[in-house]
Structures are given as structure tokens and as C-alpha cells.
């Protein structure tokens, strides 16, 4: 068996080669603080290892309130946001405030550190407005790191294609047009960059959000998460309206009350729908069978994933989720866990035989698939091995490093 490729070994090679020596990079992030945003933090550390100076502008968040700090050689500038947006008016306020802080702080970074490239990590598709003055008047290059497909995200959240949906399409096109190079998180997003975005194939690079196996540490199972029950199901992710947690709660009700399986469900993550989901669980009589941890430190996250028998992804089948790679799937695979999810294109591409696939948005079939795995521990173990092997040999962050560096080399040729 071939040795596992570790990100630390790749970083050591980059530190010797220094392919981006002398480069100065500014990264814009609107929806998560750093280093909490794992993907962007991996990118920062990769670029630092390659010899670049890296600065980041991002929002504050719980545990990340400091306005400026330097971590592992990365300059992090944080700004407050007024609220956790809901509805069109709320998003307008949030995005306007974020844009103001990004404009303000980008000039501060320009004076203190300088930069030759801006990388914007959506959502929203507005940060090209920050990059344009530097691109036009300072010769700065612009890279679009395409994390979310916002027209599909809007439709998933609000269920309609109206003026704001068309606005999302317009802003997406403007972002693609402004970008000299695009980083796509998967092949579905790459196809969007080539079609809706009109980008040339040589300017679009697929950099997946693979886990860093040096950082994700399996732990001994902790019985406290099981609440004394025979089985345990784990979930990691955002507690939002479009993540399908309501469907998962219905599946939990079927597992516990209809099939009489002694099961604890542990949901790790925070988000705007957390309070309403707790209320829903209580109304369904599930309060003693469902644990909501809220946003949890890595130690608790790793402990839950190490303790679960089965992990789940209940994201609804819609155009947004069908084309998006969910980080939770890759993390489940890194912890050698069998998975149950609804059948979406990129979820199936990532997990392949490490997952069972329930009928679209069908809570009863989700419950049946979970019980199927409870009853076949040997199959669970084999699925876990398949998933872990796929991470170790293809999908971990160590395999994304060279493509990210290639995107930065390419943008300087434009």
C-alpha cells in the first residue's frame, strides 16, 4: 500500500521550491471568520508555504473577535457584521456593511503590506467591486474562488426566480468577467464557469475542499454522546433552513418511534435555524433522542465523528445541492464513517461506495437506509474503509495544493 500523502510533506516541498516567492496576496471572505473557515485557511497556509505574503479580510465571529492578528504568518483583518441576515432587506444590510469594511480594510492592507493579487471567496458575488479599483488603477490581478452558486442558493432559500434571482445571475456574470482566473470547488462549478461565466478552460482550476489529514484526528469513541443508547447517528454542518435538518428530524422520528431503534442523533453546528429546529424536535417528542451541540470546538467535533455509527447528510435535492460539494461528506469519509445521504451528483461523486443514497427528499427512505446500516456492521466497516482510502489517495488537501499554486501562476500570465 502506498504511503499516505500528507499536507505537511507537500508544504515542506513548497517551502524549498518557493514557487510564489515575492507574491503578495489579499483574500476576501464575507461569511466566516478565519481560521474557522477550513478551506480558506488551508489556502492561506498553502500560499504561505509557497513563499507568498498573505493577508485576509474577514468578519468577526465567536472566538474570533480580535480586529487584527497574525497567525502562522498570515495577516488577518476582521470586521463586525450587523446581523445574521434573513430576507432580502437583511442581506442588503449585511452585504452593504461587509462591502464597506472590505473597501476600508483593503486600502489599509495596501498601505501596510501591498498586494499583487486579490482572491475573493463568495458568497456574495459582490466582492469584485472591491477588486476593480485595484485592478484598473494598480494592475492587481483578480481570482474568483467560487464557493457557492448564488442563483441556485437564492432559489433554494426562497423558492422563486424573481428580480433578485436575476440580480444574482447578473452579479455572478460580472464576477466571472472581472476574474482573470477562477478556482472552482468541483467539476459542476467548473462547468458553470465555462458556460454561464464564459471562461476559457485554461483559466479555470478545480481545487476541492479536501480535509487536511494532519489536522483531523480520530479519537476513541466517547459514550457520553450516545446518551446510553445502542446506536448513534452524527451530523456536522450549518443549521439553516435549506440544509434539510427538518427532513432528518422526521427520519429520526421514524427510526425511534416507528422502527423502535434505540438511537441518539447528535447534530454539531450553529446557524440561524438552530432555535426553531430545537423547537421542532421537542414538538416531535425527540428532545431526549437528539443532541444539538451548537457550534463546537474541534475536539468535540472530532469526538462526535469518532463516536458515531453512521453519519448523515440530509441536504435537499435541488439544483444548488446537486452541484455543490459538501465538506461534511469529506470529513465523514476522513473519519472512516459510513454515510447516508440523498442522491445528488457531487455527493455521489465524493462518497461513491462509502455512502448509501436515499430517494430524493424522502425521510422514510433515509430512515430505512440508516437502519440497513445498523443491521450490517461489516458493511459499515467496509464503507468506512472505502471512504478513508478515497480521501487518502485523491481528495485530501494534499492533492489540491499543486492546482492552487498553478492557478496563481496562471493569473500572473494574464
Image: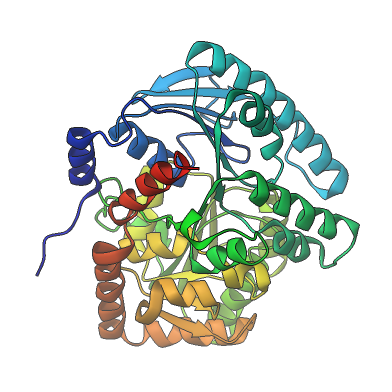
Residue drawn 50% across and 18% down? 114
Q: Is residue 281 above or below residue 75?
A: below
Q: Is residue 9 above or below residue 391?
A: above
- Looking at the image, which residue is at 45% across and 42% down? 413
Camera-side residue: 132 or 354? 132
Q: As displayed, is residue 218 above or below residue 152?
A: above
Residue 286 visible, this orientation: no
For image coordinates 83% across by 53% down, the residue present is 167
Describe residue 79's horizontal placement relative to residue 187 as left or right: right
Q: Where is residue 154 drawn, in percent x and y?
A: 76, 59
**Residue 319 x %, y %:** 67, 72
Task: Name the residue furthest front.
Answer: 413
Query: Residue, x 23% and y 39% (percent of image)?
Result: 14
Q: Is residue 151 left or right of residue 229?
A: right
Q: Residue furthest left?
A: 1
Residue at the top extreme of this rendering: 112
The N terminus lies in quadrant: bottom left
Residue toward you, 362 or 169? 169
Q: Position of residue 96 (x, y in %)?
A: 79, 33
Q: Position of residue 39 (x, y in %)?
A: 44, 47
In which quarter of the view is residue 20 placed?
A: top left
Amino acid at each position: 500500500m502506498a504511503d499516505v500523502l500528507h499536507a505537511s510533506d507537500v508544504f515542506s516541498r513548497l517551502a524549498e521550491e518557493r514557487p510564489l516567492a515575492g507574491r503578495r496576496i489579499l483574500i476576501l471572505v464575507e461569511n466566516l471568520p478565519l481560521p474557522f473557515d477550513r478551506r480558506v485557511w488551508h489556502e492561506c497556509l498553502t500560499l504561505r508555504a509557497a513563499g507568498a505574503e498573505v493577508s485576509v479580510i474577514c468578519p468577526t465571529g465567536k472566538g474570533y473577535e480580535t480586529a487584527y492578528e497574525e497567525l502562522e504568518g498570515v495577516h488577518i483583518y476582521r470586521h463586525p457584521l450587523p446581523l445574521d441576515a434573513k430576507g432580502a432587506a437583511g442581506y442588503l444590510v449585511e452585504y452593504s456593511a461587509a462591502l464597506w469594511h472590505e473597501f476600508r480594510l483593503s486600502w489599509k492592507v495596501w498601505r501596510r503590506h501591498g498586494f499583487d493579487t486579490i482572491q475573493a471567496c463568495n458568497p456574495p458575488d459582490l466582492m469584485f467591486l472591491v477588486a476593480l479599483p485595484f485592478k484598473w488603477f494598480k494592475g492587481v490581478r483578480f481570482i474568483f474562488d467560487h464557493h457557492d452558486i448564488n442563483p441556485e442558493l437564492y432559489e433554494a432559500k426562497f423558492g422563486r426566480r424573481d428580480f433578485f434571482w436575476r440580480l444574482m445571475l447578473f452579479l455572478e456574470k460580472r464576477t466571472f468577467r472581472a476574474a482573470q482566473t477562477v478556482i472552482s470547488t468541483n467539476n459542476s462549478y467548473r462547468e458553470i464557469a465555462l458556460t454561464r461565466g464564459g471562461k476559457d478552460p485554461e483559466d479555470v482550476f478545480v481545487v476541492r475542499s479536501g480535509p487536511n489529514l494532519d489536522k483531523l484526528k480520530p479519537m476513541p469513541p466517547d459514550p457520553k454522546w450516545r446518551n446510553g443508547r445502542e446506536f448513534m447517528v452524527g451530523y456536522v454542518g450549518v443549521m439553516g433552513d435549506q440544509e434539510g435538518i427538518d427532513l432528518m428530524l422526521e427520519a429520526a422520528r421514524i427510526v425511534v418511534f416507528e422502527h423502535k431503534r434505540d438511537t441518539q442523533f447528535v447534530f454539531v453546528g450553529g446557524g440561524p435555524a438552530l432555535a426553531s429546529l430545537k423547537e421542532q424536535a421537542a414538538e416531535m417528542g425527540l428532545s431526549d433522542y437528539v443532541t444539538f451541540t451548537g457550534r463546537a470546538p474541534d475536539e468535540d467535533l472530532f469526538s462526535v465523528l469518532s463516536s458515531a455509527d453512521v453519519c448523515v447528510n440530509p441536504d435537499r435535492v435541488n439544483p444548488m445541492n446537486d452541484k455543490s460539494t459538501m465538506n461534511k461528506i469529506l470529513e465523514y469519509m476522513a473519519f472512516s464513517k459510513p454515510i447516508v445521504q440523498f442522491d445528488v451528483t457531487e455527493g455521489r461523486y465524493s462518497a461513491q461506495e462509502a455512502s448509501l443514497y436515499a430517494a430524493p427528499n424522502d425521510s422514510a427512505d433515509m430512515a430505512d437506509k440508516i437502519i440497513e446500516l445498523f443491521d450490517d456492521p461489516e458493511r459499515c466497516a467496509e464503507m468506512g474503509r472505502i471512504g478513508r482510502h478515497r480521501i487518502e489517495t485523491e481528495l485530501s488537501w494534499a492533492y489540491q495544493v499543486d492546482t492552487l499554486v498553478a492557478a496563481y501562476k496562471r493569473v500572473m500570465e494574464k
